[in-house]
């Protein structure tokens, strides 16, 4: 076939046909939902025809949701949404971070069908003050789906978790969901650095809130909680898929910024007997993913501010997100969803605000980057 | 024991010494045995550690006038010449610091044209002498480095302090830029479309102060802005300049 130049209109029609063919296996009702979602996405992005059919990603995401909703109760597949790292000051001081959190809540509430639950990934407050945590609870209470709370260091080190536990219960716990065992860890414990220095609670919190000071200790799950995890998993057969929620990454990415879990290897050792393990973590405020042995790791986005990639230690499998535009308050931020497959493997959908969403699949991680490679950045960190 | 009078140093290095020479102060290690005064005056020793004369009218603790000191130094040199007939007193200027293009000892070394990896020439006759830059000592460089590092440390402090930045919403630079990462000072000047002009680093710093930090933009020569700039550049040491990079 002779190579010929395709006009914009031709390309548009070809892409549109591709999408519509893919949608044929849906029933009419789901088809209309997907169409509505695509139309919404077009309007949100201000795209006008004859823009080529870039909506495939959005449609795909909608597709996956509808497929998983028809999964049998008691077994995967299912979907959960996440909102993480809201870092809110009280709104009288700073509105920007509150707006981000509220936007994420609206995103999740607009999902149709609703996810099974919403994971809150930690760092609800910025400086751990009771007013901040109360405000955070109030913002998240608008969510329609049930919320599973996870604690971050910004929530903890002002009063060592008193207010958090009062509002949200124990910092680490586990539950079973449709055949998957879910563990929520408190993985931002720190060895005492404040008593010897005679620091006040506010000073301690201020130090922990800083990423690049070397005064605070590195994060850890800690001996006590690892013992708790060991006992918790003792009852779980190794054929069960595991979902582990953690604020710190549960591997060692960059020590200087506490993108780090000091006892990562020991935690990973406890998870080793299980062939299907996915860790979903917060703290790093960027698109980040990794595979270590049997464990897939996905970092969640923040709703408050994005972080640059660390100068060293970035996992080889991570495909960076484009460098955020500082002039766009929403760029590099977002929320997302995790689709858990029949086998209990998890795909992560990054709903990046002001950008096209990106899906990262378990197949990509477990094939060591050979299949389903996520789209490359145009502007990597430097 | 080394005598503490400043005139000793002037004698030791000769009449050509400038105010910058302070090597003897920096090196306290070699000690000379200064003989006790025989006539109730003060013994002045030459830097060879052997030749000395006693200034009879000078009581311990008393300072000489400049003219008296010059006479003493001439007397000392005369004595040395008498005691070393036929020998030549080499007026050795301080050798240029070892390892020629070391950033520590010789900031000027990097500007020397030619092969920066060449070994430092042996001291004395093959090295140019007498100009201001060549007279600086390692101690001077240490002092200047300390001053610069203090300035950079001040910038680091402000960088991490929302109040010092004048933020009205509790935001500091390090929240988005840990260790001043992602600041790319080496890429300015460049056209910043969002500002609709060619921007320098300080324009970007001021934009950040006004917007994500919600403080008041600093004047171009505000000491805080200069310190912030210094800290940001210091964190990027060694990265090649690349103005215009987007």
Image (cartoon, rainbow, N blue to C red):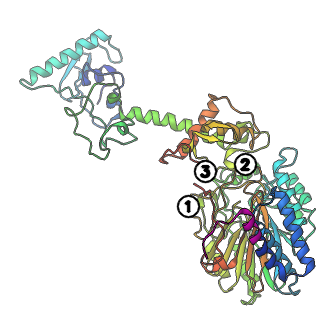
Near mark 2 (Cα within 10 A), the count class, few <14, some 14-19 or many ≥20, is some
Residue in front for this viewpoint, A174 or B82? A174
Point out the stretch of residues depicted in magenta. A1-15
Q: Nearer the viewer, mark 1 or mark 2?
A: 1
Kindly tell me whether residue A81 is visible in this rendering: yes
Which residue lies most toward the front here?
A2
> Along the horizontal axis of the image, is B97 left or right of A179?
left
Query: Would you say the residues marked 1 and 3 are in contact, meaning their CB atoms lie under 8 Å apart?
Result: no
Q: Quadrant of residue A242?
A: bottom right
In the picture of the structure, the residue carrying the numbered disc 2 is A203
A39 and A373: which is toward the camera: A39
Q: Residue at x 75, y 57 (%)?
A: A333
The chain carrying label 1 is A
Between B9 and B135, the one lying in front of the other is B135
Q: Give the class, few, some or many, for how many residues have Cα within 10 Å of label 3's Cα (few <14, many ≥20).
A: some
Q: Measured from the top left, where is residue A60 in percent x and y? A: 78, 73
State the SS at label 2. Answer: helix
- Expressed as whole percent of the image width and height from the top left, the position of residue A307 reads 68, 55
Residue A53 forms part of the magenta stretch: no
* Residue position for label 1: A312
On residue B13, the disc is: none
Report helix, strand or loop for mark 1: loop
Labels 3 and 2 positioned on one and the same chain: no
In the displayed image of the protein, which residue is found farthest to the left? B86
Give the distance between the C-alpha atoms of the residues marked 1 and 2, in whole angstroms.
29 Å
Chain of the residue on which disc 2 is drawn: A
Query: Residue A119 is drawn in which quadrant?
Result: bottom right
The answer to if A3 sits in the magenta stretch is: yes
Chain for mark 3? B
Rendered residue at 9%/26% (across/down) = B87
Residue A179's x, y, as percent? 82, 86
Residue located at (72% from left, 50% from top)? A206
């Amino acid at each position: 076939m002779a190579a010929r130049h395709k006009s914009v209109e031709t390309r548009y029609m070809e892409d549109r046909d591709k999408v519509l063919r893919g949608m044929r296996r849906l029933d009419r009702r789901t088809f209309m939902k997907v169409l509505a979602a695509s139309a919404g996405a077009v309007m949100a992005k201000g795209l006008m025809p004859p823009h080529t059919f870039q909506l495939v990603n959005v449609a795909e995401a909608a597709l996956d949701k509808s497929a998983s909703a028809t999964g049998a109760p008691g077994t995967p597949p299912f979907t959960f949404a996440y909102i993480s790292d809201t870092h809110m000051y009280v709104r009288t001081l700073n509105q920007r971070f509150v707006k981000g959190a509220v936007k994420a809540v609206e995103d999740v509430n607009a999902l149709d069908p609703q996810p099974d639950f919403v994971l809150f990934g930690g760092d609800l407050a910025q400086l751990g003050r009771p007013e901040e945590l109360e405000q955070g609870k109030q913002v998240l209470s608008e969510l329609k789906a049930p919320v599973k709370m996870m604690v971050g260091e910004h929530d903890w080190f002002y009063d060592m978790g008193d207010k958090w536990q009062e509002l949200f219960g124990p910092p680490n716990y586990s539950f079973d969901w449709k055949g998957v065992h879910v563990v929520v860890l408190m993985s931002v414990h720190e060895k005492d650095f404040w008593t010897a220095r005679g620091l006040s609670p506010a000073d301690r919190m201020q130090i922990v809130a800083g990423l690049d000071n070397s005064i605070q200790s590195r994060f850890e799950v800690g001996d006590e909680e690892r013992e708790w995890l060991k006992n918790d998993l003792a009852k779980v057969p190794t054929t069960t898929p595991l979902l582990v929620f953690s604020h710190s990454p549960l591997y060692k990415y960059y020590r200087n910024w506490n993108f780090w879990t000091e006892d990562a290897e020991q935690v990973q050792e406890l998870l080793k007997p299980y062939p299907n393990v996915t860790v979903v973590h917060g703290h790093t405020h960027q698109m980040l993913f990794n595979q270590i042995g049997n464990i897939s790791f996905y970092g969640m986005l923040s709703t408050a501010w994005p972080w640059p990639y660390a100068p060293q230690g970035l996992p080889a499998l991570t495909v960076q997100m484009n460098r955020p535009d500082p002039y766009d308050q929403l760029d590099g931020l977002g929320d997302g969803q995790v689709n858990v497959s029949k086998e209990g493997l998890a795909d992560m959908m990054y709903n990046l605000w002001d950008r096209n969403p990106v899906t990262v699949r378990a197949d990509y991680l477990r094939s060591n980057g050979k299949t389903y490679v996520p789209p490359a950045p145009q502007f990597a960190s430097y | 024991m080394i005598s503490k009078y400043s005139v000793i140093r002037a004698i030791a290095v000769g009449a050509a010494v400038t105010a910058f020479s302070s090597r003897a102060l920096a090196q306290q290690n070699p000690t000379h045995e200064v003989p006790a005064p025989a006539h109730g005056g003060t013994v002045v020793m030459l830097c060879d550690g052997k030749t000395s004369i006693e200034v009879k009218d000078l009581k311990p603790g008393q300072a000489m006038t400049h003219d008296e000191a010059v006479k003493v130094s001439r007397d000392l040199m005369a004595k040395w010449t008498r005691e070393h007939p036929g020998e030549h007193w080499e007026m050795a200027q301080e050798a240029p610091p070892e390892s020629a293009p070391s950033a520590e000892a010789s900031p000027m070394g990097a500007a020397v044209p030619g092969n920066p990896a060449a070994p430092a020439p042996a001291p004395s006759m093959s090295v140019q002498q007498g100009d201001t830059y060549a007279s600086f000592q390692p101690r001077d460089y240490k002092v200047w480095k300390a001053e610069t590092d203090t300035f950079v440390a001040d910038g680091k402090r402000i960088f991490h302090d929302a109040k010092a930045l004048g933020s009205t919403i509790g935001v500091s630079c390090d929240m988005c830029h840990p260790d001043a990462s992602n600041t790319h000072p080496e890429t300015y000047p460049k056209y910043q479309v969002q500002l609709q002009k060619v921007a320098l680093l300080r324009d970007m710093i001021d934009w950040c102060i006004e917007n994500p930090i919600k403080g008041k933009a600093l004047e171009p020569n505000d000491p805080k802005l200069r310190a912030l700039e210094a800290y940001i550049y210091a964190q990027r040491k060694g990265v090649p300049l690349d103005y215009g990079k987007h």
